[in-house]
Amino acid sequence: MMVLPVWPKRCYRPRLLWGLLSTMIVLMTLRFLTSGGHEELLSHSLPYFMPDKGHPISPPLLPSSDDFLLLPTPEARSSTDPSLLVLVVSTPHHVTQRQAIRSTWGGARWAGKFTVRTFFVLGLPREPSLQSALEQEAAEHQDLVQGRFLDTYGNLTLKTLSLMGWAATHCPGILFLVKVDDDIFLNLPGLAEELEHHTTLVPTYLGEIHWRAWPNRDSRSKHYIPASLYPAEHFPLYCSGAVYVLSGTAVPILLGASRHVPLVPVEDVFVGLCAHWAGILPQHLARLTGAAHYPPDPCCYREVLLSVHKVTPIEMAAVWDSTTPYKKTCQVWQWALGFLRCKALAWMADL
Ligand SMILES: *[C@@H]1O[C@H](CO)[C@@H](O)[C@H](O)[C@H]1NC(C)=O
């Protein structure tokens, strides 16, 4: 007679198995959410509004020098011949924000193996009286790039075209272009280390990916996109506009693609459309956070995250001062929890 195996009465083993299994699922989900590399999976789940292969590459849409009012002198631009160019999208009256960046992360001239230069991009002030102050600021710091268009929210896409055009014409040798808003704390050493793992041979577009985003059809919204301009129901994948990275090779290609793409007034969507048209797939970098705000925690700002959004000039200076001269800011346990700890801090701050 055969002896059948029986479970102990209290079902001890299945429970243990369930525990292990659910822990594994939670860990795998967390890993999926906090790592990059799943953009291909995401991109297949989206209805595309146009084919992304087989376009001939158009010549880039380049600005002429008449398109700019203020420009850094050629010496100021090439004094370090940047391989990593940071362009901060600013606006005429944000003098304090620009000063906070200059005196913190924006003052760096090296990061990892890259030489770095940071410039501010803006348009024309509504109040003409502000222009003379801008001229003084430009003369003193040689770091303003001012396009000849009114600096308004509706012209942000023009500002992006203008900054990419300036980069392509004046700094053609760069390896990477980093576009950030002026309320971003950028962890340049961390970003440089990450970028060393990315090739610049193929055009690269990196950031925190927005997926399954759709056009806002409410005409009262500042993000309104009329169906006549963009009829499809979804956007292709695109990187959050607060901070994204383009390889130097991607910039002229996007400028070429911009001739074929509707000029939607939402800047990051527009870049995503250009990339999509050109067949450049965005890559997700979760540590390049664009959407959430993180409370000023030196470990998160200086080591774990690559960028933090919605940082006031005061917070920026405070986080910088508390950790200068640059030293390790994370305890071992903070390192071990890494990104999850910083996310948890952000969630708690939001409650
Ligand atoms: C964009 O800039 C142009 C040129 O200065 C100006 O005429 C236009 O009104 C601006 N558009 C928006 C939407 O602000």
Image (cartoon, rainbow, N blue to C red):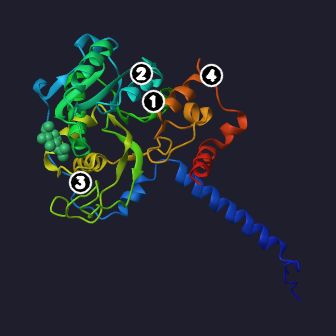
* Comparing labels 2 and 4, the label whose residue is closer to the camera: 2
- Callout 2–callout 4 Cβ contact below 8 Å: no
The residue positioned 27% from the left and 37% from the top of the image is 250
Q: Quadrant of the C terminus?
A: bottom right
* Comparing labels 2 and 1, the label whose residue is closer to the camera: 2
- Give the residue type at disc 1: Glu
Q: Which mark is residue 196?
A: 1
Query: Label 2, label 1: how many angstroms apart (C-alpha)?
Result: 24 Å
Closer to us: 208 or 12: 208
The earlier-in-sequence mark between 3 and 2 is 3
Taking the image as shown, residue 63 lies to the left or right of residue 6, namely left
Query: Label 2, label 4: how many angstroms apart (C-alpha)?
Result: 20 Å
- Callout 2–callout 1 Cβ contact below 8 Å: no
The residue positioned 70% from the left and 33% from the top of the image is 331
The earlier-in-sequence mark between 2 and 1 is 2
Point out the quarter of the image occupied by ligand 1.
top left
Query: Label 4, label 1: how many angstroms apart (C-alpha)?
Result: 21 Å
- Kindly identify which residue carries mark 3: 52
Q: Quadrant of the N terminus?
A: bottom right
Q: Which mark is residue 327?
A: 4
The residue positioned 30% from the left and 62% from the top of the image is 234
The earlier-in-sequence mark between 4 and 3 is 3
- Kindly identify which residue carries mark 2: 102
Task: Tell whether circle 1 marks a residue whose Cβ is less than 8 angstroms from ligand 1.
Answer: no
The earlier-in-sequence mark between 3 and 1 is 3
